[in-house]
Image (cartoon, rainbow, N blue to C red):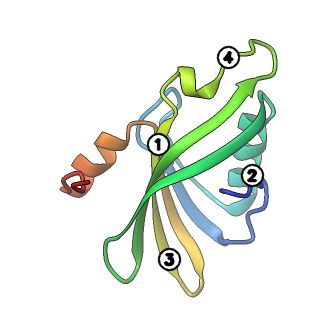
Amino acid sequence: MEHGDFSAIAWADPQIEWEFPDGLYPGSFAGQPGLGERFRDWLSTWENVRFETTEFRELDNQRVLVRGHYYGRGKTSGLELRQIRSQVAALFHVGGGKVTRLVLYVDPERALADLGLAPEAG
């Protein structure tokens, strides 16, 4: 993601479960093709999208929480992603060398709350 290639999903298990627990379109989904389509649809409205990680937190041997910011500009509006809530969190469940479940949070504080975690100091 930090390299800007959001459409490459070879990292995902073909039967990946993915969820948006908050945001405009919450829901649960399954399958690698749908995930790729969702990323491509979202990317089609932005230019120069990049992601900067601010925190990696290994929760156990199968889960990693990643928090960071999106940067980019709206193709039509010119709106900078930094001007809106661009901080996000993603919970990756890993098994067999692939991501088997991905939970994408628009509100990173909700991710911490859902997981019963406190923000890391410093």
Quarter of the view holding residue 17: bottom right
Q: Residue at x 22, y 47 (%)?
A: 113
Which one is earlier in the sequence, the residue at label 1 or at label 3? 1
Q: Label 1 vs label 3: CA separation? A: 19 Å
Q: Position of residue 27 (x, y in %)?
A: 49, 41
Which one is earlier in the sequence, the residue at label 4 or at label 1? 4
Left or right: residue 120 versus residue 22 is left
Q: Position of residue 73 (x, y in %)?
A: 72, 25
Q: Residue at x 54, y 71 (%)?
A: 100
Within 10 angstroms of label 1, few (less than 14), some, or many (20 or more) residues? many
Q: Label 3 vs label 2: CA separation? A: 21 Å
Q: Which residue is mark 4?
A: 79
Query: Is there a contact, CB below 8 Å, between mark 2 and mark 1?
Result: no
Q: Label 4 vs label 1: CA separation? A: 18 Å
Q: Which residue is mark 2?
A: 4
Q: Which residue is mark 3?
A: 94
Kind of residue indicated by mark 1: Val
Kind of residue indicated by mark 2: Gly
Query: Circle 2 sits in a helix, a strand or a loop, which is it?
Result: loop
Within 10 angstroms of label 2, few (less than 14), some, or many (20 or more) residues? few
Q: Furthest-front residue in view? A: 122
Query: Circle 1 sits in a helix, a strand or a loop, which is it?
Result: strand
Give the label on residue 88, or none: 1
Query: Circle 3 sits in a helix, a strand or a loop, which is it?
Result: strand
Q: Position of residue 74 (x, y in %)?
A: 74, 22
Q: Nearer the viewer, mark 4 or mark 1?
A: 4
Q: Furthest-bottom residue in view? A: 96
Which one is earlier in the sequence, the residue at label 3 or at label 2? 2
Q: Nearer the viewer, mark 1 or mark 3?
A: 1
Query: Circle 4 sits in a helix, a strand or a loop, which is it?
Result: loop
- Which of the image's four quarters has the C terminus? bottom left
Q: Residue at x 70, y 32 (%)?
A: 72
